[in-house]
Image (cartoon, grey):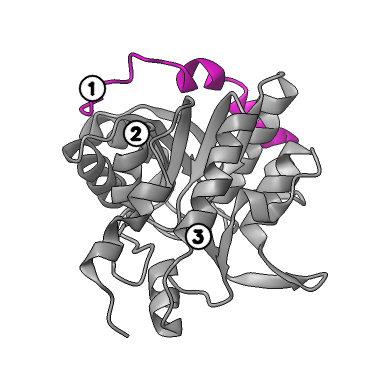
Amino acid sequence: MAYAASMCTDWQTAMKPSTRPGLFVTGTDTGVGKTALTAALCRLLRSAGERVLPFKPMASGAVERDGRWLAEDAMALAASVGDDIDPASVCPVTFREWLAPGIAAAQRGERVNWPAIGRAWLEAQAQATSLLVEGAGGLEVPLDASGHPTVLELMMHLGLPALIVARSGLGTLNHTTLTVRALRSSGVRVAGVVMSDGPEGVTDDASVASNRAWLERMADVTVLARLPRSTHDPVWADPAWASILSKVDWAGLITDESISDPRR
């Protein structure tokens, strides 16, 4: 199927830059813990009285629930705010295949339904005073069959500061520093990094003890927190995570207009 070049701007027409303060949660890789952190932050901020909503434009790996195909990420994000929110309003476009959304769309010979995403995006902004937007995978993941936008291009368009989720273990210095540099060189503000030990933990990884300090030095970025391995179900409701995350002034960070220099 051929894709007209003019179609590449559909997403820009449908999904306007954010009118609300917030953060765009991105990662150095897929499966690094973006959804768990986003849900944990939504739960924490809601408990503090903040009217925050999660939003994930699209997701892969949907499962069937009551006759509908819903992304597991969307169900977790909806549950984290506890308002009986429809997961489909949190994540309006889903693909069954465990593929980058753009690749899944291309294999189906379809275009992503950007008007549906745009409507859900407007509704989220109308209902919330702040937003936590979660991307799919890392920065260069294609979000439509044309290859555009990538996650990075969407971030540039929406104008929200980036919160980077990175692995705690070996390899994170390279992956995270490259992510920070790509964001800053594209004009995206960086609010900070949260390191995650992941579901397997990092007990045998000697690099963990020094990675945080080295990352702050190499990337000139603030590591806001490190989340340990958790066996809590759901992981985003782990009291240990809440205790760690509560040490950060997230409400202040979200509304911090001083996060204006892409070099920060």
Discs 3, 2 touching: Cβ within 8 Å: no
Q: Amino acid at mark 2?
A: Gly
- Cα separation, mark 3 vs mark 2, equals 24 Å
Q: Amino acid at mark 1?
A: Asp
**Residue under label 3:** 31
Relative side of 102 to 117, left or right: left
Residue 259 magenta-highlighted: yes
Relative side of 18 to 62, left or right: left
Residue 9 percent across, percent down from the top left: 29, 55
Q: Amino acid at mark 3?
A: Gly
Q: Which residues are magenta?
A: 238-264
Residue 78 magenta-highlighted: no
- In terms of sequence position, does the residue under pointer 1 or pointer 2 come before the other? 2
On residue 159, which mark appears? Answer: 2
Pick the residue in front: 79 or 240: 79
| SS for dot 1 | loop
Relative height, residue 95 to residue 177 (above, below)? below
Residue 224 percent across, percent down from the top left: 45, 28
Residue drawn at point x = 49 percent, y = 26 percent: 20
**Residue under label 1:** 261
Residue drawn at point x = 57 percent, y = 66 percent: 94
Residue 139 percent across, percent down from the top left: 32, 53
| Crowding near the residue tagged with mark 1, few <14, some 14–19, many ≥20 C-alpha atoms within 10 Å | few
Badge count: 3
Q: Is residue 51 visible?
A: yes
